[in-house]
Amino acid sequence: MLAGDPALDFANTLHWRGGNEVDFLPDYQSLIDWAVPAGLLSDGERKALVAHARICRDAATETHSAAIALRTAWRERLDRRTSARKAPLQQGVSEGPLGQMLAAALAEPRLLLPGDALAMEPASRVLALPVARIALAIAGLELIPGERKLGRCEGDPCGGFFLNTSRSKPRRWCSMDSCGNRAKVRGFRGRFIAEEVKEPNA
Ligand SMILES: [Zn+2]
């Protein structure tokens, strides 16, 4: 959870690691496990959903597929936004498949309120809670006006998304411990080799 926003952390659940693209959300269980540290579900809600998912396996699989489709549409929008650089925040989110998915996920307002909804709604419907919360996070990031700058990790082939919060020095890496550190080591190695080449002629 390094993006500074749960909607962007969600986009980053498909991520390059060690030269491979890794999906951190391969099933419903991993979706709800991820949603707790992401700040989108409480641990109590996660436990209730685990119990519901055992009863309604098909609905859990369906919700997982909806989450992955939402992530694909969301990543496409972020891709466009970060490559165009100039696309304004509030423009166009309600159009196209992403808008339709957000509208569908947000159509159950009771799911978005903590508390009784989990106990009162049918299990198959309650399972959609993580997708509703993700949609709320995306809608919040896209629709609430504010000075938020979207950044993308320069690590190749990382491309992780994050919020650029620094005014003075734009953030360049998803994490200093991984991509930032690798770039530093590469830069150091490059300089070291360049100096070694220079040495015999000096
Ligand atoms: Zn990175």
Image: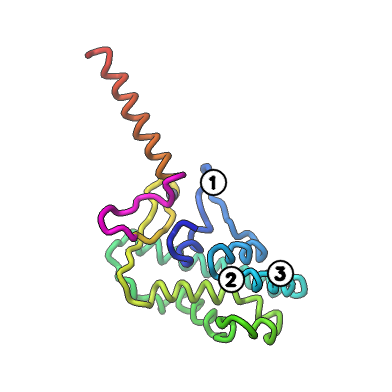
Rendered residue at 48%/66% (across/down): 6
Task: Choose the circle earlier in sequence order: 2 or 1.
Answer: 1
The relative height of residue 76 versus residue 58 in the rendered view (above or below) is above
> How many tags in the picture?
3
Amino acid type, label 2:
Leu
The percent coordinates of residue 200 (x first, y second) are 27, 12
> Which stretch did the figure color magenta?
165-178
Helix, strand or loop status at disc 3: helix
* Of marks 2 and 1, the one in the foreground: 2
Main SS category, magenta section: loop
Name the residue that disc number 2 marks: 41
User: Does the rendering let one see residue 165?
Assistant: yes
Amino acid type of the residue that numbered disc 1 sits on in the rendered structure: Asn
Q: CA distance from mark 2 to mark 1?
A: 28 Å
- Which mark is on residue 50? 3
Q: Quadrant of residue 30?
A: bottom right
Whether ligand 1 has any atom under 8 Å from the Cβ at mark 1 is answered as no
Write down the residue under mark 1.
20
